[in-house]
Amino acid sequence: MDVLSAVWQFFQEQVLGMSWLNQLVGQGLQALGLDLASRWGGSLHFFLYDVIKITILLCTLIFLISYVQSYFPPERSRRILGRFHGIWANMLSALLGTVTPFCSCSSIPLFMGFTSAGLPIGVTFSFLISSPMVDLGSLVLLMSVFGAKVAAIYVVVGLVIAVVGGTLLEKLGMERYVEDFVRHAAVLDTGDHAPTCRERLGYAKGQMVATFRKVFPYVLIGVGIGALIHNWLPESWIEGILGDGNPLGVVLATLVGVPMYADIFGTIPIAEALLSKGAQLGTILSFMMAVTTLSLPSLIMLRKAVKPKLLAAFIAVCTVGIIMVGYLFNAIAFMIL
């Protein structure tokens, strides 16, 4: 048991957390004459370490996940989902969202394709919620910052929000609020051609490059904000706004997260800095979920596919679910940290 614990700790700290990289960057900055204890030196250390770490994890994870995803093109996914009904279809759709390394905006074309193919509205919304909020990449990155327990709980709770949210939207009879052009769009049948291993590797490489180019600017912004919070904002400010002394911290974090546009890779550095400054865990996770699921650009795109009543219901269901999860995490944080 001790051996397994030591192996896991090594994996957590050196492979996922890349403590060796943290030390290497620090030594390099010290060799250049920077004082890591100063605000500027600490900020630069935080920025370089997190950018390099997230870039390595991002490229590796997107490549691997995209290779897996090559076995589940939209048409095949539609056929698989079409075999299930009720809550099982929602659960499978939410799980399918975990293997799609997309931000909220990138998930909407697939959502439209699934909807036009005749899948129930609840199933397609379960996918739309889970795809940006929960994926295998976020699981690994969350493990590298918060540990395996928090990461696993985040993923499970995200899937629950996706399943419950999609089911609720279907029960409310929201199908009639999908725009006509989406319901009647033609569905492309890709046939049964199975790509070769070389084609899958090429697809994975292409997805990795495209995703990196799209995401990296937000990684830089996110890490920059994290470095600012980590080394420049007084701890008392963060605790006062997002700590346990403010009962509205979860609501505030959720509302602040909605107009932002980033994915999980850009929000984790901010979350890491907020946690180190005394913000509550549930408040931080609510912020992350709001940013990844309810970003303003994605809502604008979604409005093109659904009518205002359905868009409002989607926002309300996700917002209430995220806020409830935030308060729940805050209540049990002492058990999991």
Image (spheres, grey):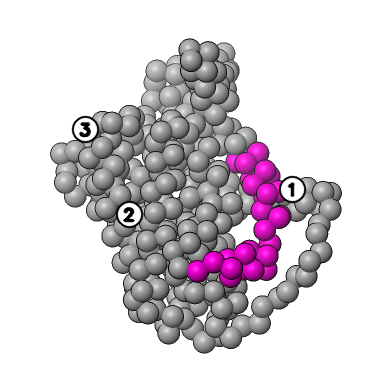
Horizontal and vertical percent position of residue 172: 34, 76
What's under tag 3, amino acid-wise?
A: Ser
In the shown orientation, is residue 62 left or right of residue 221? right
SS under mark 3? helix
Q: Which of the numbered marks, if any, corresponds to residue 152?
A: none
The residue that label 2 is drawn on is 322
When asked about the image quadrant of residue 241, the answer is top left
SS under mark 2? helix
Image position of 103 with respect to 316: above or below: above
- The answer for how far apart the CA atoms under marks 1 and 3 are is 45 Å
The residue that label 1 is drawn on is 205
- Mark nearest the camera among 3 and 2 is 2
Q: Main secondary structure of the magenta part?
A: helix
Q: Which of the numbered marks, if any, corresponds to residue 236?
A: 3
Q: Is residue 116 visible?
A: yes
Image position of 163 with respect to 65: above or below: below
Q: Are marks 3 and 2 in contact (CB under 8 Å)?
A: no
- What range of the chain is rendered magenta? 58-85
